[in-house]
Image (tube, rainbow, N blue to C red):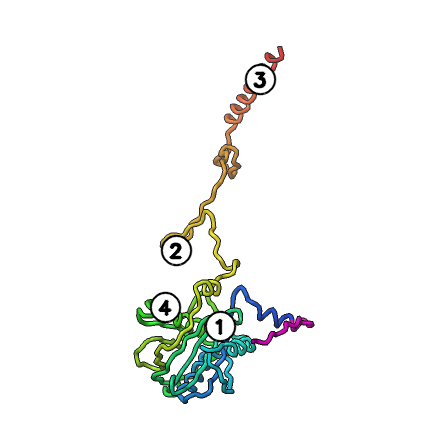
Amino acid sequence: MSVLQRVVKPTTRKGKKILLKKEPQVIEGPKKAIFLKGRKTSDKVRYVLNDMYDLKKPEGQKLSKRNDITVFEDATKVEFLCKKYDSSLFVMGSHSKKRPDNLVIGRMFNNELLDMIELHVEEYEGLKNFVASKVMLGVKPCLLFNGPLWEESEELKHLKSIFIDFFHKETVNAIRLQGIEHSINFNATPDGPRIDFTLRRTKLPTEDLMKEACTQPKELKLTKKKNISTDELGTTHGRIHVGKQNINSIQTRKMKGLKKTVEEKKIEKATKRKALAENNELVKKKRV
């Protein structure tokens, strides 16, 4: 039976700000992750955890103590640690005779386990085995998923989604190619630092829970704009509806070339007098 945790209302302005930051935001930032060890861990798993932590920094929290946790049997301890460190992702490494060089990657939703996938580290060539510059803090990587299998299997689809959530940084509108310093390739070719995984146990969410976890806030939903369309080349076209206009009453620019002559003015005055006289006669006839 789980122990109920009391919710203490904040009494200071600083405490209110901290709680507001922990609440769901309209535009979420990079997801935090915790890295923990099981009862036993091999050297290979420790190196994998260290390299993944270096790629995740500064949104990562590495725990040094070992934990007696069996995630697929009971996930309450992992949920408690994720809530404690305000993390929505976790990576746990373990090693046993039944499951050697084991790695579990999972996600949280509403402080509860959403999904997790267990992987076997078959072969690993770490960052320390290659002479290259260190990964800079906060650099956004380019993720490349090679092969059609990522879209054919439901389990691999979820694994791809977890990897994207794990390595995702801030959302940007444009990318400058000169600013991309490193890329992470998810394939089977032995070139550069790499990790070979084989799929073990999985715990996937239901369709309703996954749909609820992927819902976007109303503020981010695009509303259809009237009378605006975009062609195939990306040009935006707008349609403006204007009422009927009397062209004769439009005030045009006065120019010397358009100025009326003396004769035209006399003719215009004569026509106006004639029209006024006819109008007066009609009014008199009606009165009679």
Seen from the viewer's position, the closer of residues 268 and 222 is: 222
User: Does residue 97 belong to the magenta stretch?
Assistant: no
Q: Say which quadrant the C terminus sits in.
A: top right
Which dot marks residue 113?
Answer: 1
Which dot marks residue 72?
Answer: none
**Sequence order check, earlier mark of 3 and 2:** 2
Q: Residue at x 36, y 72 (%)?
A: 144
Neighbour tally class for label 3: few under 14, some 14-19, many 20 plus, Cα within 10 Å: few
- Residue type of the residue flagged with mark 2: Gly
Neighbour tally class for label 1: few under 14, some 14-19, many 20 plus, Cα within 10 Å: many
Place of residue 35 in the rendered image (x, y in percent of width and height, measured from the top left):
48, 81
Badge 4 element? helix
Q: Residue at x 44, y 66 (%)?
A: 206
Q: Identify residue for label 3.
A: 277
The stretch in magenta equals 1-15
Foreground mark, 4 or 3? 4
Which residue reaches farthest top?
A: 288
The Cα atoms of the two marked residues, 2 and 1, are separated by 42 Å
Foreground mark, 2 or 4? 4
Q: Chief secondary structure of the magenta span?
A: loop
Q: Identify residue for label 4.
A: 154
**Sequence order check, earlier mark of 1 and 3:** 1
**Sequence order check, earlier mark of 4 and 3:** 4
**Sequence order check, earlier mark of 2 and 1:** 1
Q: Are marks 2 and 4 in contact (CB under 8 Å)?
A: no
Q: Identify residue for label 2.
A: 234
Badge 3 element? helix
The Cα atoms of the two marked residues, 4 and 1, are separated by 18 Å
Seen from the viewer's position, the closer of residues 187 and 3 is: 3
**Sequence order check, earlier mark of 4 and 1:** 1
